[in-house]
Image (cartoon, grey):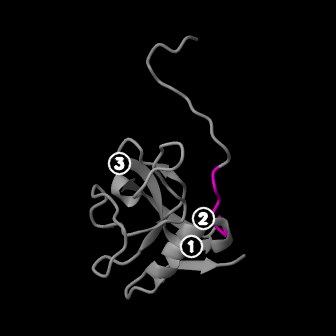
Amino acid sequence: MHNKSGITKSSFGAPTQILANVELQSSVGCIVPSSLVSAADANGNKIAKAGTPIHVDLTNMAAPAAAPSADAPMNAVLLHDVDVTRGNANGTALIFGFVNINRVDSSVAQAITAAKAVAGASPLLTFMKA
């Protein structure tokens, strides 16, 4: 079958599995804004990394997620890498679960540490070195 519709398929490496326990988790779909990533990587892509702390308005799922702040503390993390090179993209927000810090990027681990220190950060996310 010949693909004339303009649909492209790209294959990448295996996705990063940040969960320490894949059975005990709950996640929701979210919109990941391109503003969540400040700079492009060496290939010119803007990738929001798995484990990135975010704030999701669970009463308005159509609103894009935001970086955590004092007014909107971390209540979720990205479950998988999300490519926001071409603008906002769909992602998965982990709202309950056990995250293995050893499996996230070092810059993401630092962001998690900072986000956990903000009052009101979600107690439903457990971060461990497993």
Q: Earlier in the sequence, mark 3 or mark 2?
A: 3
Residue type beneath disc 3: Asn
Point out residue 97 in the picture as x, y percentages from the top left corner.
56, 72
Q: CA distance from mark 1 to mark 2?
A: 6 Å
Q: Which residues are magenta?
A: 15-22
Residue 109: numbered disc: 1
128 relative to 91 in the view: left or right = right
Cα separation, mark 3 vs mark 1, equals 23 Å
Q: Residues within 10 Å of mark 3 (few under 14, many from 20)?
A: some
The residue depicted at 61 percent of the width and 70 percent of the height is: 24
Q: Is residue 122 visible?
A: no
Q: Residues within 10 Å of mark 2 (few under 14, many from 20)?
A: some
From the viewer's perspective, is residue 23 above or below residue 90?
Answer: below
Answer above or below: position of 1 versus 64.
Answer: above
Task: Check disc 1 and give the amino acid type.
Answer: Ala
Question: Does 103 appear in magenta?
Answer: no
The answer to which image quadrant residue 58 occupies is bottom left
Q: Are marks 3 and 2 in contact (CB under 8 Å)?
A: no
Return the mark for residue 88: 3
Rounded to the nearest whole Å, what is the CA distance between mark 3 and mark 2?
21 Å
Proximity of marks 1 and 2: CB atoms separated by less than 8 Å: yes
SS at circle 2: loop
Residue 105 disc label: 2
Q: Is residue 5 above or below residue 29?
A: above
Question: Going from the N terminus, do you reach mark 3 or mark 1 first?
Answer: 3
Residue at 41%, 57% in the rendered image: 37
Compared with 89, 51 (above or below) is: below
